[in-house]
Amino acid sequence: MRGLAARDKPGMVGTVLRTAGKWVLDFALPPRCAGCDTIVSDVHSFCADCWTAIHFLGHSGCSTCGLPLEATEQTTCGACLARAPRIARTRAAVAYDDVTRTLAIRLKYGRKVAIARTMAHYMAPLVSDEGERLLVPVPLHRWRLWGRGFNQSALVARELSRRLDVPADPLALRRIRRTPPLKGMSPLQRRRTVAGAFRVHDKAAIAGKTVILVDDVLTTGSTAEACARTLKRAGAARIELVSWARVVKPSRLMR
Ligand SMILES: [Zn+2]
Ligand SMILES: [Zn+2]
């Protein structure tokens, strides 16, 4: 089933996620603000309060890592110029804060499909069109309370796949061992903890492709980095990452 566009086999990912039953309900109800559940006029829109509270990142930062630029930097940050990261392009729709965290949590417990669609709506314009693309959700989740056999990033990847008409393969990358939560670890400890935690299921499915990793919340990036390393070794031509929210130092966000 690898390599098939989502439209060719619409039930494929859904079977994995077991969320199909939620569908009908989601679309029978009036659109609600994805941040606070207030009824709004348009699908994928936020109410005025949530809209002003959200810090949209989009394409505004470094052309490579996506982090907000310092005043002295041009289009690529100093760190990326000094050493090109393994992930050629990282983008997040929004900065991680109270409102956007609520959305990430509701993707797990709330109206999953509607939330995933809203996220995909803001994430899709951030996916590049370089090479032969394949959307691959990050298979590991740091937060154990979200670990009930449901990968919310796979749901977002499916929605991105529909929207962009790019194939998604939720099983391309697998977690081969459990890792403890990374919170509180140093960057080096994080790297060591996640090293070797992933395996490519079928090298032929990713060989020569632009693999677009899909994540819900990006923190330090050590998990995505480990995924990228595994994918590159298995023959992927280029790795990108698109996430819903990203933890960014408040001092780097200009309002
Ligand atoms: Zn709201
Ligand atoms: Zn950078």
Image (cartoon, rainbow, N blue to C red):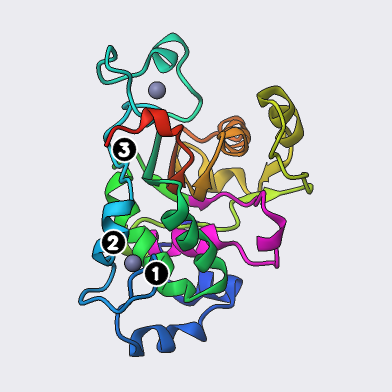
Q: Position of residue 217 (x, y in %)?
A: 51, 48
Q: Nearer the viewer, residue 162 or 246?
A: 246
Total count of labels: 3
Q: Nearer the viewer, residue 221 or 10?
A: 221
Tell me the kind of residue under disc 1.
Cys
Residue annotated with mark 2: 49
Q: Is residue 239 visible?
A: no
Q: Position of residue 242 (x, y in %)?
A: 42, 45
* Distance between mark 2 and mark 3 Cα atoms: 36 Å
Q: Is mark 2 within 8 Å of ligand 1?
A: yes
Asked if residue 6 is positioned above or below residue 75 in the image, the reply reads below
Q: Is mark 1 within 8 Å of ligand 1?
A: yes
* Distance between mark 2 and mark 1 Cα atoms: 9 Å
Disc 3 versus disc 1: nearer the observer: 1
Residue at point 34% right, 38% down? 131
**SS class, disc 1:** loop
- Are the two marked residues, 2 and 1, in contact with CB atoms closer than 8 angstroms? yes
Residue annotated with mark 3: 130
Q: Which residues are magenta?
A: 136-161
Q: For ligand 1, which image quadrant applies?
A: bottom left
Q: Is residue 224 left or right of residue 247?
A: right
Residue annotated with mark 1: 36
Q: Residue furthest top?
A: 82
Within-10-Å neighbours for mark 1: few <14, some 14–19, many 20+: some
- Are the two marked residues, 3 and 1, in contact with CB atoms closer than 8 angstroms? no
Q: Earlier in the sequence, mark 2 or mark 3?
A: 2
